[in-house]
């Protein structure tokens, strides 16, 4: 078996303890692509598929050795792991053990938990940052309350960049997190953005149609002006709704048209809403299955009607026929 493993991974030197790294102990093992997607630093923002491409391309090293095969690895035997030379946090054994227990979410529904968190500006949506920057998960783990007994298995649902604030969902159920994150499920994400720059109806129309930036295609977003668009004004609040969660998507699309985002707040994700959750606080909310979410699926953005609305009243409209998920308690 050891000889077969060496053949699969020709880049690994013979002095590495392959048999121990690729241990069959399922309690402390995690597939390499999942480890990278879950624990990579925010500036990499890897999906499982992107992580698989990095592995296949020889961009991943463990203990200084190149890994080209996406196999389960035993976290107890990892000294260091890098992607393109950038350090990735090595998860604690307790995290992997809890993750493996809850990944299938096969326990009674009472053990599946979801928290709506009001993320602060300046913190990373990560378990740990090698550079010592503040992270959301570490802050929640220190906070105690009902989160304390799940602190080793907390998983963010999606990401927000360091300078974005507002709603982020946290769960102890990996399967539920993955369901809500999948781009194909197209959960609606709503943001408020304050932009500096000259805003025109032509720019709004282009964003609504979708745009390609540096070879990356961004789907059209529903963009509405909050309040009145003042002639000659350079600061405007927008309400933006999209179905994708690509890295820094809103900032990139707006900056592409000369609009600098000076503040960005996520107010909803699917049927979960920020509501009046105070900044920095976490609220336990009911777990709402993907099939029950109404704010999902392809958006039909009629730019003609949107332009008329912008010019007539300049106000963003909210969906009135959807009831947001209410919180259970504050922690």
Image (spheres, grey):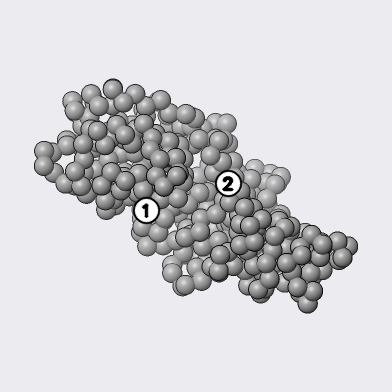
The residue lying furthest to the bottom in this view is 15
Residue 55, image quadrant: bottom right
Q: Is residue 101 visible?
A: yes
Q: Which x, y percent locates residue 226? A: 23, 37
Reading the chain from its start, which is encountered first: label 2 or label 1?
Answer: 1
- How packed mark 2 is, by other alpha carbons closer than 10 Å (few <14, some 14-19, many 20 or more), is some
Residue lying at 67% horizontally and 73% vertically, measured from the top left: 63
Mark 2–mark 1 distance (CA, rounded to whole Å): 20 Å
Q: Secondary structure at mark 2?
A: helix
The residue lying furthest to the left in this view is 232
Q: Is residue 280 visible?
A: no
Left or right: 20 in relation to 54: right
Residue lying at 40% horizontally and 59% vertically, measured from the top left: 162
Total marks shown come to 2
Q: Please name the residue that numbered disc 1 is placed on.
A: 165
Residue lying at 28% horizontally and 35% vertically, measured from the top left: 204
Depth check, front residue: 182 or 324:
182
Q: Which x, y percent locates residue 245? A: 46, 44
Depth check, front residue: 313 or 320:
313
Q: Which x, y percent locates residue 89? A: 57, 67
Instruction: Give the number of the disc on residue 177.
Output: 2
Depth check, front residue: 222 or 61:
61
């Amino acid at each position: 078996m050891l000889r077969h493993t060496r053949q699969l991974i020709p880049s690994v030197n013979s002095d590495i303890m392959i048999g121990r790294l690729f241990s069959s102990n399922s309690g402390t093992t995690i597939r390499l692509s999942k480890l990278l997607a879950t624990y990579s630093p925010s500036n990499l923002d890897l999906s499982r598929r992107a992580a698989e491409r990095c592995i296949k391309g020889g961009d991943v090293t463990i203990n200084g050795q190149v890994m080209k095969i996406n196999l389960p690895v035993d976290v107890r035997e990892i000294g260091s792991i890098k992607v393109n030379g950038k350090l990735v946090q090595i998860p604690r054994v307790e995290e992997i053990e809890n993750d493996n227990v809850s990944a299938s979410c096969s326990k009674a529904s009472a053990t599946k938990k979801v928290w709506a968190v009001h993320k602060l500006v300046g913190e990373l949506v990560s378990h740990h940052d090698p550079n010592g920057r503040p992270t959301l998960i570490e802050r929640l783990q220190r906070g105690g309350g009902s989160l304390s007994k799940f602190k080793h298995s907390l998983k963010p649902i999606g990401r927000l960049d360091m300078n974005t604030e507002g709603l982020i969902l946290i769960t102890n159920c990996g399967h539920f997190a993955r369901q809500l994150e999948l781009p194909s499920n197209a959960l609606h994400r709503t943001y408020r953005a304050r932009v500096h720059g000259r805003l025109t109806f032509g720019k709004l129309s282009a964003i609504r149609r979708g745009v390609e930036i540096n070879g990356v295609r961004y789907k059209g977003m529903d963009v509405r002006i909050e309040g009145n668009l003042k002639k000659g004004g350079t600061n405007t609040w927008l309400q933006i709704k999209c179905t994708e969660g690509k890295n820094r998507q809103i900032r990139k699309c707006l900056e592409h048209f000369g609009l600098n985002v000076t503040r960005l707040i996520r107010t909803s994700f699917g049927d979960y809403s920020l509501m009046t959750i105070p900044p920095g606080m976490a609220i336990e909310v009911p777990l709402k299955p993907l099939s029950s979410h109404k704010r999902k699926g392809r958006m039909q953005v009629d730019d003609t009607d949107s332009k008329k609305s912008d010019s007539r009243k300049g106000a963003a409209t909210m969906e009135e026929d959807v009831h947001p998920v209410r919180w259970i308690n504050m922690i």
